[in-house]
Image: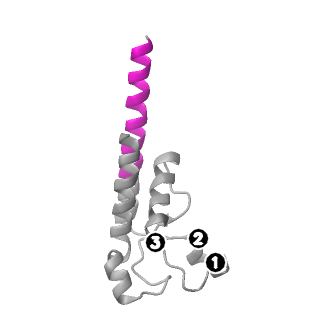
């Protein structure tokens, strides 16, 4: 439950962090590869992967949070800015600590 909460919280944080947040992105109608992007999604690197109007939405950021918490590293979207890298590092540390604490508790109950 704690791990799931962390994934949701960081997904929302990534959504708010990237290019000024969802309201700023919608207001300015920034092109996908515009400067100021905090994350580089595969669809931005290769336009043939998606429609020309593709934009990252909340489920994309939730997936980034899920993969970061699971793999302890970026897998889908790469962080471009120091703040995005810092937040992803914090999520990795928090996720690893949560998994280790749960495992330690399980071992102590069994032993």
Q: For numbered disc 2, what is the local secondary structure?
A: helix
Judged from this view, the residue extending furthest toward the top is 111
- Magenta highlight range: 89-110
For the residues labelled 2 and 3, say whether their Cβ atoms are less than 8 Å apart: no
Crowding at label 3, few (<14), some or many (≥20) Cα neighbours within 10 Å? few
Residue 69, horizontal then vertical, whole percent: 46, 48
Q: Mark 2 or 3 closer to N-term? A: 2
Judge depth for marks 2 and 3 and give the one in front.
3
Q: Residue at x 36, y 48 (%)?
A: 6
Q: Mark 1 or 3 closer to N-term? A: 1
Q: Residue at x 33, y 69 (%)?
A: 16
Q: Is residue 67 above or below residue 80?
A: above
For the residues labelled 1 and 2, say whether their Cβ atoms are less than 8 Å apart: yes
Residue 24, horizontal then vertical, whole percent: 32, 81
Q: Is residue 64 above or below residue 81?
A: above
Residue beneath disc 3: 57
On-image quarter of the N terminus: top left
Residue beneath disc 2: 42
Q: For numbered disc 1, what is the local secondary structure?
A: loop
Gap between marks 1 and 3 measured at Cα: 18 Å
Residue beneath disc 1: 46
Residue 23, horizontal then vertical, whole percent: 32, 79
Crowding at label 1, few (<14), some or many (≥20) Cα neighbours within 10 Å? few
On-image quarter of the C terminus: top left
Q: Which mark is residue 111?
A: none
Gap between marks 1 and 2 measured at Cα: 6 Å
Q: For numbered disc 3, what is the local secondary structure?
A: loop
Gap between marks 2 and 3 measured at Cα: 14 Å
- Magenta region, mostly helix, strand or loop? helix
Judged from this view, the residue extending furthest toward the right is 48
């Amino acid at each position: 439950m704690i791990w799931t909460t962390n994934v949701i919280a960081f997904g929302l944080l990534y959504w708010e962090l990237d290019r000024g947040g969802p309201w700023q992105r919608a207001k300015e109608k920034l092109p996908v590869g515009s400067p100021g992007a905090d994350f580089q999604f595969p669809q931005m690197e290769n336009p043939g992967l998606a429609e020309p109007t593709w934009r990252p939405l909340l489920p994309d950021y939730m997936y980034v949070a899920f993969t970061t918490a699971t793999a302890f590293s970026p897998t889908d979207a790469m962080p471009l800015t120091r703040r995005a890298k810092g937040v992803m590092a914090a999520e990795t540390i928090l996720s690893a600590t949560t998994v280790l604490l749960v495992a330690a508790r399980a071992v102590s109950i069994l032993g």
